[in-house]
Amino acid sequence: MAEGWSRLMITTQSDLAKNLSLNIKAFALLPTTEGDHRGAFSLPRQQSKHAHYADFKQLAIVYDADALSLTLGKSDLSAGLSTLYSPVDRFETTYAATPMHAFKTGMWQARLDVPAGDDTVTAALLPFDDRSVTPGVHSRWLGSSGSYLFN
């Protein structure tokens, strides 16, 4: 059986006041697999391993001034320098129900970024422990072992 997977990503930014903006990134998925996706829009403290057909990758209010940047809401939180895989990037959640098309899904956070010369010092409070989405029980990625992990 052939499988298909399509993703639509929508990005917008709205300036609410000087230095204050609302940033939104949302995605919608159209998979042909059955049983791996349920519902839409996860809430904070999402513990379900089922993928959603639509969700927010970013839904944050950002105050951005010269001396600092403050982010409240769901947004990216990456650590390290690598674009493919960084072992220090331990907090960001990932949509990996289809591992060949995995992407970051953002974290609920309160984050302060302060520029320090060519670098940035970041402090973040992560109030919720959200789970990454892994392949569902009907996924072809589980194979005969019933696990997507290599043992």
Image (cartoon, grey):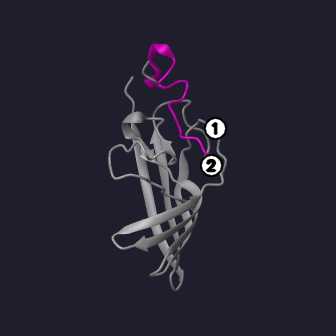
x and y, in percent, of residue 128 in the image: 65, 50
Q: Could you tell me which secondary element the residue under label 1 belongs to?
A: loop
Residue at x 64%, y 45% (from the top left corner): 46
x and y, in percent, of residue 64 in the image: 49, 77
Residue at x 42%, y 67% (from the top left corner): 120
Q: Between disc 2 and disc 1, whose residue precedes? A: 2
Mark 2–mark 1 CB contact (< 8 Å):
yes
Is 135 one of the magenta-colored residues?
yes
Q: In the figure, 1 relative to 91: above or below?
A: above
Relative depth, front residue between 77 and 68: 68
x and y, in percent, of residue 89 in the image: 44, 47
Residue at x 36%, y 73% (from the top left corner): 117
Q: Could you tell me which secondary element the residue under label 2 belongs to?
A: loop
What residue is disc 2 on? 42
What residue is disc 1 on? 48
The residue sitting at the top extreme is 144
Location of the C terminus by quadrant is top left
Asked which quadrant contains residue 137, the reply is top right
The boundaries of the magenta stretch are: 129-148
